[in-house]
Image: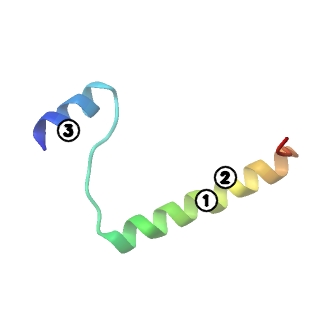
Amino acid sequence: MPEVRDKLTALGLSVGHMPGPQLAAREQAYARTWAGIIQASGFKPQ
């Protein structure tokens, strides 16, 4: 939807499309990266 894309772009976000498997792989990579960062920080949930 162009109006949504325009609003997001105005907020400084990049708007694009990728196939489901590519999106899933990207999100899994992000999860691994953040899990490592959180573990290395020593953060413990309270």
- The colour scheme is rainbow
Q: What's the distance in space between the residues labelled 3 and 2, CA to CA?
A: 27 Å
Numbered label attached to residue 5 = 3
Mark 3 neighbour density, 10 Å: few (under 14) some (14–19) many (20 or more): some
Q: Is residue 41 left or right of residue 23?
A: right
**Res 36 quadrant in image:** bottom right
Residue furthest bottom as drawn: 21
Q: Look at the picture and state if 6 lies above or below 46.
A: above
Q: Are marks 1 and 2 in contact (CB under 8 Å)?
A: yes
Amino acid carrying label 3: it is Arg
- Image spot of residue 23 (x, y percent): 39, 64
Q: Look at the picture and state if 28 lies above or below 37.
A: below
Mark 1 neighbour density, 10 Å: few (under 14) some (14–19) many (20 or more): few
- Residue drawn where x is 56% and y is 63% of the image: 29
Residue furthest top as drawn: 10
Q: Look at the picture and state if 2 lies above or below 33.
A: above
- Mark 1 or mark 3: whose residue is earlier in sequence: 3
Amino acid carrying label 2: it is Trp
The quadrant in which the C terminus is found is top right
Q: Is residue 19 left or right of residue 43?
A: left
Q: What's the distance in space between the residues labelled 1 and 2, CA to CA?
A: 5 Å
The quadrant in which the N terminus is found is top left
Q: Look at the picture and state if 31 lies above or below 25.
A: above
- Residue drawn where x is 31% and y is 40% of the image: 14
Q: Are marks 1 and 3 in contact (CB under 8 Å)?
A: no
- Image spot of residue 41 (x, y percent): 83, 44
- Image spot of residue 8 (x, y percent): 28, 33
Residue on which disc 2 sits: 34
- Residue drawn where x is 29% and y is 69% of the image: 19
Mark 2 neighbour density, 10 Å: few (under 14) some (14–19) many (20 or more): few
Residue on which disc 1 sits: 31
